[in-house]
Image (cartoon, grey):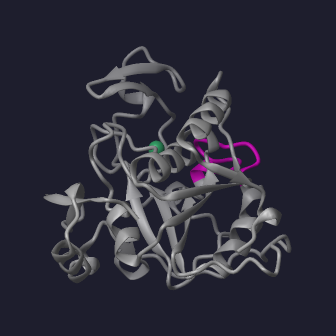
Amino acid sequence: MCHISPTSKETIDEGLSVFFVFGVITSAFITHAGAMASRSAVLSLAEAGISPQVGAPPADVLDPSFAPSERDGLLVIDVQTDFMPGGALEVPGGTEVIPIVNALVRRFEHVVLSQDWHPPKHSSFASQHEGKSPYDETQMPYGAQTLWPDHCVQNTPGSAFHADLAIPARARICRKGFRSAIDSYSAFFENDRVTGTGLQAHFQELGVTTVYVVGVAYDFCVRFSCEDAAARCGATAVLVKDATRAVGLPGSVEAAAKGLEQAGVRIVNAAELRS
Ligand SMILES: [Zn+2]
C-alpha cells in the first residue's frame, strides 16, 4: 500500500531479523520481502506463541453487503488485558469494542492484531522517571512523551490479548514498544517517527490498500496508527468509531479528532460499512 520500502536491517529482542521500510520500492524488493515474510516483525500466531481463540459472540451489527476484498486489511489495536477495565492502564469501556471487533474479524481475510509489548522498566513507564507520576509528560530524545503506569510487560497476563477477543489462525501479530528507549503508539512507526514495525511492509506484500482500524485507545495508538496509514503509507484509512474507546487525558480526544481529520482518515460506524 505504500511507496516506501526497507533498506535497513535490525535485530529485535527475540532474535528475529526484520526489515524496515525507507526509500523507494522496487519489484526486486517485493520478491525479497515476500521470501523473508516468515522472519518479518509481523509474526504468525505460532511465532508469537499465541493460540487461536474463538472469543465472545460477534455483535450483529454489520450490513450483509459488507464484504471486504483482498485489498482490505483489518488492524486491531491493542485489545490487551491491561487496556481493558480493571487493567493497569484502563481504557474506560474498552471491552465494549470486542463484540464489534469480533464481527469484523470474521469478515476479513487479512487481520493484524497489534500488541503493546514492553520490556520491564520501559522508558514510557512513569516508574522509571524520578518525581514523575503516570500521565505526566516528559521529554525524550525524540520529543514529548506521556508517561504511563507500568503496563503490557512482555509475557505477563496484562500483555495477553483479552480472552473475549476472537483470534483466528490466519491473524498476524505486530508487536510494538519492545525497544526500551522508545515508546510506540502507532502500529506502523514508533514514537521517534522513524523506526518501522514491519507492518507497512506486511500490508504492502499482501497488496492491501485500505486499512480498517479498531481497538484502543482512540486518542493514542488508534489515532496514530490511522494517521500513519493515511498520511505516511498512502493507504485509505477507515476508523470504525463504535469499535474504539479513548483513555481520555486532558485534551487528548479533541487532539485526536483534529489529527485524524487532517490526515484524511475516514470515520464511520460499523453498521455504515458497505463494500
Ligand atoms: Zn505501552
The spot of residue 143 in percent (x, y) is 34, 24
Side of 118 relative to 75 (left or right): left
Q: Nearer the viewer, residue 215 or 2?
A: 2
Identity of the residue drawn at 83% across and 75% down: 63
Name the residue: 64% across, 75% down: 105
Is 255 on the left or on the right of 6, as rendered? Answer: right
Above or below for 256 versus 135 = below
Q: Do we see residue 154 in this rendering?
A: no
User: Measured along the vertical axis of the image, is residue 161 above or below residue 149?
Assistant: below
The quarter holding residue 270 reads bottom right
Q: Is residue 83 above or below residue 219?
A: below
What residue do we see at 50% from left, 84% from top? 170
Where's residue 271, x and y in %? 82, 65
| Residue displayed at 67% across by 43% down | 91
Image x and y of residue 99, in percent: 76, 68
Dividing the picture into quadrants, the one containing residue 53 is bottom right
Left or right, 59 with respect to 248, comes to right
- The one nearer the camera, 175 or 14, is 175
Write the start and end of the magenta stretch as one range: 82-94
Q: Is residue 246 visible?
A: yes
Q: Magenta span has 87?
A: yes
Answer left or right for 114 relative to 102: left
Task: Let me know if residue 17 is in the magenta part.
Answer: no
**Vertical relation: 208 (above or below) 233:** below
Horizontal and vertical percent position of residue 41: 30, 66
Viewer-proximal residue, 209 or 100?
209
Pick the quarter of the image with the C terminus.
bottom right
Q: How many marks?
A: 0
